[in-house]
Amino acid sequence: MELIIGSHVSYKASDQLLGSVKEALSYGANTFMFYTGAPQNTMRGSIDIRLRDEAFSLMKDNGIDINKVIVHAPYIVNLANIQNYDFSVSFLRKEIERCNILGIKYMVLHPGSAVNSSREEALNNISDGLNLVLNNNCDVKILLETMAGKGNEVGKSFDELKTIIDNVKYKDKIGVCLDTCHLNDAGYDISDFDNVLEEFDNKIGIKYIGCVHINDSKNILGSHKDRHENIGLGTIGFDNLINVIYNEKLKSIPKILETPYVTKNDSSKEREYPPYKNEIEMIKNKVFDNDLIKRVRGN
């Protein structure tokens, strides 16, 4: 089957989507994920249509399907919290509009954190907010990300995600992004991924999965901590992640790496580098290369 694999890439004011595509290609990727601006604030520059069209052309020439490219919503959107609720709804609408201009069909969204409210209230807030931004004229599908359950995070279980989805009016505009690190930290055993998928299918439905974040974890199963690790160096392990990536039921789903940058010595200075080219190479070969990891880290 064709592997749809990529990573998080940057989106800079100078070259915007064109720069994102070039970065993805430098990693040997055929998809990618990006933020349309800083994830922690509201600063957003206007979209340069010329750069967008150049990006479209470059993607077409290199076999990247725009329909498999992902945008990640900013962290400052918290539909679970009734405080600043109007801001979250309004800003999410603006992000959807930016996706429309950029031709992006999928946006990953953290469900939010239950602040000064019960989990039941938080779940209702999320579905209500989604119903305010999703309609028949919306060409973007929101993918709720599975969360580790750190603090008051909502979306740590398939049951919570099901509750949200059940109360969203436009079911064709909503989906789920599985995150392997988050699943592990929430208590889902990735070493038995077929069973995890079966539970998801029974409660929500495989058809709702629109993206998979591929991350190893620094933490033990059920730790609720959310600390990503490089592929094959964490508690999930390389072979278990390969089983997720190449699972036949997810063959048409884009897989996105969000693993940590690595530090290595460069001209007697320590610098951080993205590991994605090397990790994608290992994933394509289905072989963990410990020497490759050492070279990346400058060991």
Image (cartoon, rainbow, N blue to C red):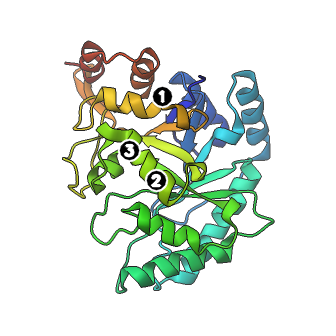
Q: CA distance from mark 2 to mark 1?
A: 17 Å
Which label's residue is closer to the chain start, 2 or 1? 2
Where is residue 165, by image quadrant? bottom right
Which residue occupies 27% across, 52% down? 185
The reply, left or right, for residue 66 in relation to residue 124 is right
Number of residue marks? 3
Query: Is 229 placed above or below 72 here?
Result: above
**Amino acid tagged 1:** Tyr
Where is residue 136, by image quadrant? bottom right
Which label's residue is closer to the chain start, 3 or 1? 3
Q: CA distance from mark 2 to mark 3?
A: 9 Å
Residue closest to the eye, 254 or 78: 254
SS at circle 1? loop
* Residue corresponding to mark 3: 195
| Residue 184 on image: x %, y % | 29, 48
Q: Mark 2, residues whose alpha carbon is within 10 Å: few (<14), some, or many (≥20)? A: some
Which residue occupies 60% across, 23% down? 2
In this orientation, does residue 45 appear? no
Q: Which mark is residue 246?
A: 1
Which residue occupies 42% across, 34% down? 244
The reply, left or right, for residue 166 in relation to residue 193 is right
Q: Which mark is residue 200?
A: 2
Query: Is 201 placed above or below 276 here?
Result: below
| Residue 75 on image: x %, y % | 45, 63
Query: Is 279 placed above or below 213 here?
Result: above
Which label's residue is closer to the chain start, 2 or 3? 3
Which residue occupies 67% across, 35% down? 18
| Residue 50 on image: x %, y % | 79, 41
Q: CA distance from mark 3 to mark 1?
A: 15 Å
**Amino acid tagged 3:** Asn
Query: Do the numbered discs 2 and 1 sit on residues whose CB atoms are within 8 Å?
Result: no
Query: Do the numbered discs 3 and 1 sit on residues whose CB atoms are within 8 Å?
Result: no
